[in-house]
Amino acid sequence: SCLPQIKTNVFNSTGQNQYLGKKLERGGKKSIDILVQQLCAGDFEPQATEFSFEQELNLPDTKLGEVKIYGKIDRLDLYEKDGHTWVKVIDYKTGSKKIAYDDIYYGLSLQLLVYLDGAMTVIPAEDILPGGTFYFYVDDPMPRLDFGENVQAAINKSFKLNGLLLDDEMVIAAMDHEADAKTSDILPVYRSEFKLNREEFADIIDYVRKTV
């Protein structure tokens, strides 16, 4: 445990802080366990954490020149096959942030797509393609269960990635070997609006560039 090593010893100062400290520790351990399980379930390989990038964008008004975007991606995974490289971006969150097209349209939630676009721009590969871009919630879930429901399955469901993924059976299988068209313990395959083909991904990334 790293909590007692904090110099101020704040997590031992009161009963409430001890509870919060234990909750943080429990949530961290559980999240790490799930992250390892999700990685082992597929073929994408982690390439970097805290991956920094910068990207130049052309502004609509040519008189204003270019603007640079700087970002730091929590985790960057790649999958390579037959000369193609697919990119998967993971952004860790402690809240309940969910991707929504309304928020993208109005420029309120562009982070995941900016990160994906930035990663695809700077990765040195000949044929770079979007695999997916997701939020992962660092949490200590206490799911409500129906009688006979599997506890671990309910916990895994709480950690399911939230975001957009490429609608490609091979790429989805590379993220989750057990996934099919409608079910996955890891990916939001059950929602067709979360699955984009290559052209749709290109269109939404182009829209985000113009919106930024």
Image (tube, rainbow, N blue to C red):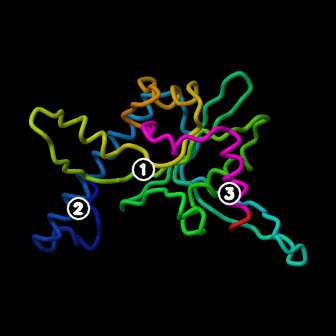
Nearer to me, 138 or 211: 211
Magenta-tinted stretch: 187-209
Task: Inspect the magenta stretch and tell me whether residue 194 lies in it.
Answer: yes
Q: Secondary structure at mark 1?
A: strand
Q: Secondary structure at mark 2?
A: helix
Dot 1 and dot 2 residues touching (CB under 8 Å): no
Mark 3, other Cα within 10 Å: few <14 / some 14–19 / many ≥20? some
Which residue is under mark 1?
136
Left or right position of 125 against 130 = right
Q: Position of residue 48 (x, y in %)?
A: 57, 45
Task: Inspect the magenta stretch and tell me whether residue 12 lies in it.
Answer: no
Q: Position of residue 11 (x, y in %)?
A: 20, 68
Q: Position of residue 29 (x, y in %)?
A: 28, 47
Q: Secondary structure at mark 3?
A: strand
Which residue is under mark 3?
53
Which residue is under mark 2?
4
Nearer to me, 30 or 18: 30
**Residue at the extreme bottom:** 63
Q: Position of residue 154 (x, y in %)?
A: 24, 40
Give the residue drawn at x 90%, y 78%: 63
Nearer to me, 77 or 135: 135
Please report whichever mark, 1 or 2, sits nearer to the chain's N-terminal start. Answer: 2
Decide: is 167 above or below 32. Answer: above
Q: Quadrant of residue 106?
A: bottom right
Nearer to me, 54 or 112: 112
